Amino acid sequence: MVVLPVSKIWTPELHVTNGVQTKMKHGNKDLLVHSNGTIEHMVIMNTVVGCEVNLYNYPFASDFCAIAINVWAISGCGMFLNFGAVSTTSANRGDWLTEAVELDAEGGRDDRNYLWVSLKMRSENPFMSLVLPSILIIVADVVSFSLPLGGGERISFKVTLVLSFIMFLIILNDLLPGGGQCSPIIRKHFCFCLVILVLSTLQSMVLTRLAKCGTLRPCSLSKSKDLLLKDTDNEEESKSDIKASEEENTAFQKVVKFLNKMAAQDQTKAIHLCFANKVDLICFCIYLTVLIVYAVVILYFSFGSRCEINQLDFWS
């Protein structure tokens, strides 16, 4: 064996077929040459690989990425690589975890070798910052059905939830993964949450109107007690030909008529409120059923469904 400088010996140049940018440098300025022509040398390659990772199940995404390391060869003529054992030196880098690395060849060809890297995303941070707040907002919207229809507390609370969710989406828009061949299902989840919040708010507005007026058509506000009393006075003042002896009976009839009107008005309001509460209960049951069905569907697509991506299409 003899040690020679790298510049004195020809060394093959490795390249990454699907690499966007690759830098290759020698691990040492010298190499070891055996008497039978075998050369021992180490090279270091830093490469950026173009790999479309499947983010359909984000933030519970996992996929494979191919790294095609080859040398020059055309129609069976040229150089060929003989790979040995493959191992990883560091599996913890950022939000992705490298689970395994395997060596394979596309179509069994010796000139198309690639490393099959298994990747899995760390779902703790995206779940805590994206999924959990949306779930809590939906839960708060469900609990808001316990607020009474009258008074406007429910409507103001639901409007606050809608505005909070919109601001939440605007702030975290940069954290959401982009589209592609397999668009992340979390985007559809946020769209559904926003739609269901708006529909819930509109439903509360309609039922509040129904509880107050008893109809969805435009109507004037109910008369107040003062207006009712004024109308009664106007009716009595128009009767100028009544006798003085009948004034006491007229005043008494006026009071009785006013009380009867108030009782009828209160009874009508109670009927309207009772009907609106029944409709509200039906809407709540439908709303809760839709959320349960949606939860089952989103769990199925998040964990039981996958979107397939051909990671070896750069050779096609």
Image (cartoon, rainbow, N blue to C red):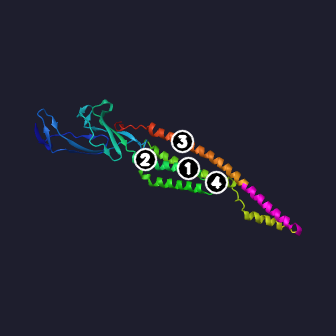
Q: Are marks 1 and 2 in contact (CB under 8 Å)?
A: no
| Circle 4 residues within 10 Å: few <14, some 14–19, many ≥20 | many
Observer-nearest residue: 191 or 264? 264
Residue 91 vs residue 68, the one in the foreground:
91
User: Quick check: 234 left or right of 165?
Assistant: right
Q: Amino acid at mark 3?
A: Ile
Mark 1 neighbour density, 10 Å: few (under 14) some (14–19) many (20 or more): few
Dot placed on the residue nearer the N-terminal end, 2 or 3: 2
Residue that appears at 58% across and 45% down:
287
Q: Position of residue 104 (x, y in %)?
A: 30, 33
**Residue located beneath label 1 in the image:** 143
Quote the CA–CA distance across marks 2 and 3: 20 Å
- Residue kind at label 4, given as amino acid type: Thr
Which span of residues is magenta-colored?
241-266
Q: Main secondary structure of the magenta part?
A: helix
Please give left or right for residue 80 compared with residue 170 in the image.
left
- Mark 3 or 4, nearer chain start: 4
State the residue at coordinates (75%, 63%). 228
Q: Which mark is residue 127?
A: 2
Q: Position of residue 38 (x, y in %)?
A: 15, 34
User: How many residues crowd mark 3 within 10 Å: few (<14), some (14–19), many (20+)?
Assistant: few
Q: Are marks 4 and 1 in contact (CB under 8 Å)?
A: no
Q: Which mark is residue 208?
A: 4
Question: Considering only order in the chain, which callout, 2 or 1, is on the residue closer to the N terminus?
Answer: 2
- Marks 4/2: CA distance? 36 Å
Q: CA distance from mark 1 to mark 2?
A: 23 Å
Quarter that holds the N terminus: top left
Q: On the image, numbered disc 3 is attached to which residue?
A: 292
Point out the tag, 4 or 2, that comes first from the N-terminus: 2
Cβ atoms at labels 3 and 4 below 8 Å apart? no
Callout 4: SS = helix
